[in-house]
Image: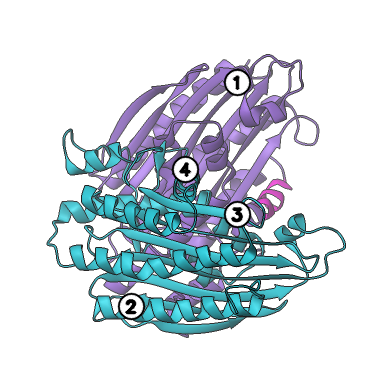
Chain colours: A purple, B cyan
Amino acid sequence: LSKQTDPEKSEIESFFRDLQNSICSSLEKADAKGKFHEDAWQREGGGGGLSRIITNGNIIEKGGVNFSAVFGKPEGHILNLAASHTSEFYATGVSIVIHPNNPWVPIIHMNVRYFELSDGTWWFGGGIDLTPHYIIVEDARFFHEKLKQVCDSHHKDYYTKFKTWADDYFYIPHRKETRGIGGIFFDRITTGEYGSKREIFEFVKSVGLSFAPIYTELMNRNGSKSFTEKEKEWQFVRRGRYAEFNLVYDKGTKFGLETNGRIESILMSLPPHAEWKYNFQPATGSDEEKTLNLLVKGHSWA
Amino acid sequence: LSKQTDPEKSEIESFFRDLQNSICSSLEKADAKGKFHEDAWQREGGGGGLSRIITNGNIIEKGGVNFSAVFGKPEGHILNLAASHTSEFYATGVSIVIHPNNPWVPIIHMNVRYFELSDGTWWFGGGIDLTPHYIIVEDARFFHEKLKQVCDSHHKDYYTKFKTWADDYFYIPHRKETRGIGGIFFDRITTGEYGSKREIFEFVKSVGLSFAPIYTELMNRNGSKSFTEKEKEWQFVRRGRYAEFNLVYDKGTKFGLETNGRIESILMSLPPHAEWKYNFQPATGSDEEKTLNLLVKGHSWA
């Protein structure tokens, strides 16, 4: 039945809640030490969320897997999205950022979200992107190929379209660098170009469900590699760039700060520890330089 | 003569250039180890600057004392300030941020600047504010009393007015905290309310010249205090807040990023090393909590 009828918000919310559970289980298992701590929070205007934070694991130094489902009268930024007669909005989603301890394990971010207004407007958004401190070419290819498989199983154009969208979105103009090697990103996709609501939801489900197998594979591949002081320093510099992107450009962060969201859930994305060195330039021919040279838009990985 | 006639931009620029020199000398002397490294840079549209960076001193871990004098056709943000017939802008100033190693020495920021347009419009802006990791009440009083003396010697209303302006400006709304204990801040002050151009320039000079005696006194008082791991951690958390303010709210940083300024000079303000801990709460009755409780607008220090 659920394959044929359009999903209601209750079905979407349930899926996201289950997704949070299954991802947390998979990450705890792969880390084999860190355990998630949960904070439930309520939103004054309606709804709330469950923030789950893991710290000081074997591999994960700091990570958050957040679920929320909020509703109420449009206010702040949401007002711009709604027609004047719209009386209610509803938004639910899962948002993840993982900062590993080992510089050879990449930072990862995933978000899947659904938004609707009482006038009947609705859309989905989301994406997964990877920020390796050091780009390992075979891992980068693995990551993009997995995302391409997810996309291709829904529509032949999705990977190219959403990969380009990620390149454009996860970009730090003042550094003239991409944040990492991108991935896929999409926002406000609704019926028409993207099929029925059911079809779009099935795509978003596939994206959400791909997170755990992809990231635990990267944890397993790299989590026990040895690393040097110098590699750790480079990780701190890259985390500084991550903080720059999130505080200056990230729309989710801006939205959260401007709409008085729960600050500790919004800023769980910030690295546990970051450094800013004046005019840091990697040595010619170094691994650091090789990584920097690959932080460009339009690189083809899959 | 210079007391009677209005200052020209050449006189203002010379003063700022000399101010950079004298402040760098005073800081090197007080630090007794760190030396400034200079990078000269050119701006494509006209002018340029001298960035001076000091790292790994006895007291100063990372600091920048930047001078710039730029001119050219209004572009980007500057266009909003200029009438359509305005053909040229000119801006010069000195900008300073010092991050000390010892958590008992405060972070300090100072900026003095002059701006003019070819249509005859001009203004000064600037200020000094202090961000102690731990608020030492007698140091906070010393700091504000010194600024009050500087202000009072020019106008009886300046301290109250510019202190309130600093409280409002150096505020982190999403944390509901001031960045530090404030100081003075003023922007776009021009003739009329604030006296002649000469009088305003003399006030800005006094502000600039007060920086070195005030901050070296705080370095001398606290630079050789011992500190613990826990105090160092708190310093890193406070530096995280500093980075949040500068990347999300600071107008100088925004202006620099949006107008494609020299990125390493703009972001020299970021701390050498910062931390973000999830939902960090200082213990009841601790020094950390006492400091947090004083990070509010409207506290009277002088």
Write the residue at 52% across / 17% down: A45
Q: Nearer the viewer, residue B47 or A9?
A: B47
State the separation of the CA atoms marked 3 and 4.
Answer: 17 Å
State the separation of the CA atoms marked 1 and 4.
Answer: 40 Å
Discs 1 and 4 lie in a common subunit: no
Q: Quadrant of residue B101?
A: bottom left
Pointer 1 with pointer 4, Cβ within 8 A: no
Q: Secondary structure at mark 4?
A: helix
Q: Is residue B212 left or right of residue A78?
A: left
What chain does mark 1 sit on? A
Residue that numbered label 3 is attached to: B194
Q: How many marks?
A: 4
Residue A113 makes an appearance in the image = yes
Pointer 1 with pointer 2, Cβ within 8 A: no
Q: Position of residue B155 (x, y in %)?
A: 49, 53
State the separation of the CA atoms marked 2 and 3.
Answer: 30 Å
Pointer 4 with pointer 2, Cβ within 8 A: no
Residue that numbered label 2 is attached to: B26
In the image, what residue type sits under mark 1? Answer: Tyr
Residue that numbered label 1 is attached to: A90
In the image, what residue type sits under mark 4? Answer: Thr
Looking at the picture, does residue B213 appear above or below residue A142? below
